[in-house]
Image (tube, rainbow, N blue to C red):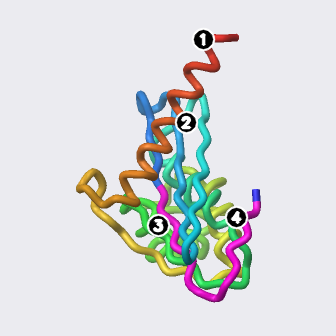
């Protein structure tokens, strides 16, 4: 889903992932703020991990906005922030291997995130999770709502 961001200001994207069991049923949530508008996105998967949901939220947030505006992504996941800002360059240079020569976990999502950020001007910010940060709390609530909705839909089927 592409959203119209309009204007020339920075788009702020707040992302979070959640999992009930790890692995287990997971959800991701995204709050996109551009000028005076807000858009919420969410989704769930049946058998996943928290880290995969954190990555999925960042991917979905980036893919939802156009290419013409600067984007600031806020995540409470050090895994996502450090992976994209510090580790990815070496992973790619080493054929998607870590410094200890092990395969990078979640390579499919790391590649999707790398592709989503390529044509955009993106800054990455870490916020402490569950610390009362309003937008991060909203993204967390969306991720958990996605899990709840998934579970309710499963009960009806």
Q: Which residue is mark 3?
A: 83
Please tell me whether residue 41 is drawn above or below residue 157 in the rendered image: below
Q: Which residue is mark 1?
A: 155
* Magenta residues, start to end: 2-15
The location of residue 111, given as percent across then percent down, is 66, 63
Mark 3 or mark 1, whichever is nearer to me: 1
Task: Give yes or no for residue 112 being in the magenta stretch.
Answer: no
Callout 1 touching callout 2 (CB < 8 Å): no
Quarter occupied by residue 58 = bottom right
Name the residue at the left extreme.
131
Q: Is residue 77 left or right of residue 35?
A: left
Q: Earlier in the sequence, mark 4 or mark 2?
A: 4
Distance of label 1 from label 2 (alpha carbons)? 14 Å
Mark 4 or mark 2, whichever is nearer to me: 2
Mark 3 or mark 2, whichever is nearer to me: 2
* Mark 1 crowdedness (10 Å alpha carbons): few <14, some 14-19, many ≥20: few
The location of residue 104, given as percent across then percent down, is 53, 56
* Mark 4 crowdedness (10 Å alpha carbons): few <14, some 14-19, many ≥20: some
> What residue is drawn where x is 44% and y is 36%?
19
Please tell me whether residue 138 is drawn above or below residue 35 in the rendered image: above
Q: What label does residue 63 carry, if any?
A: 4
Q: Which residue is mark 2?
A: 146
């Amino acid at each position: 889903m592409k959203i119209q961001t309009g204007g020339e200001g920075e788009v702020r994207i707040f992302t979070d992932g959640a999992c009930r069991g790890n692995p287990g049923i997971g959800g991701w949530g995204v709050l996109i703020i551009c000028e005076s508008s807000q858009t919420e996105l969410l989704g769930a998967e049946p058998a996943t991990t928290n880290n995969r949901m954190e990555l999925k939220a960042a991917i979905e947030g980036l893919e939802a906005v156009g290419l013409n505006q600067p984007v600031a992504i806020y995540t409470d996941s050090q895994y996502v922030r450090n992976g994209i800002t510090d580790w990815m360059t070496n992973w790619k240079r080493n054929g998607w291997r870590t410094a200890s020569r092990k395969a990078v976990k979640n390579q499919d999502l790391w590649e999707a995130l790398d592709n989503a950020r390529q044509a955009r001007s993106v800054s990455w910010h870490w916020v402490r999770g569950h610390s009362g940060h309003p937008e991060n709390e909203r993204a967390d609530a969306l991720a958990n709502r996605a899990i709840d909705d998934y579970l309710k839909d499963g009960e009806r089927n």
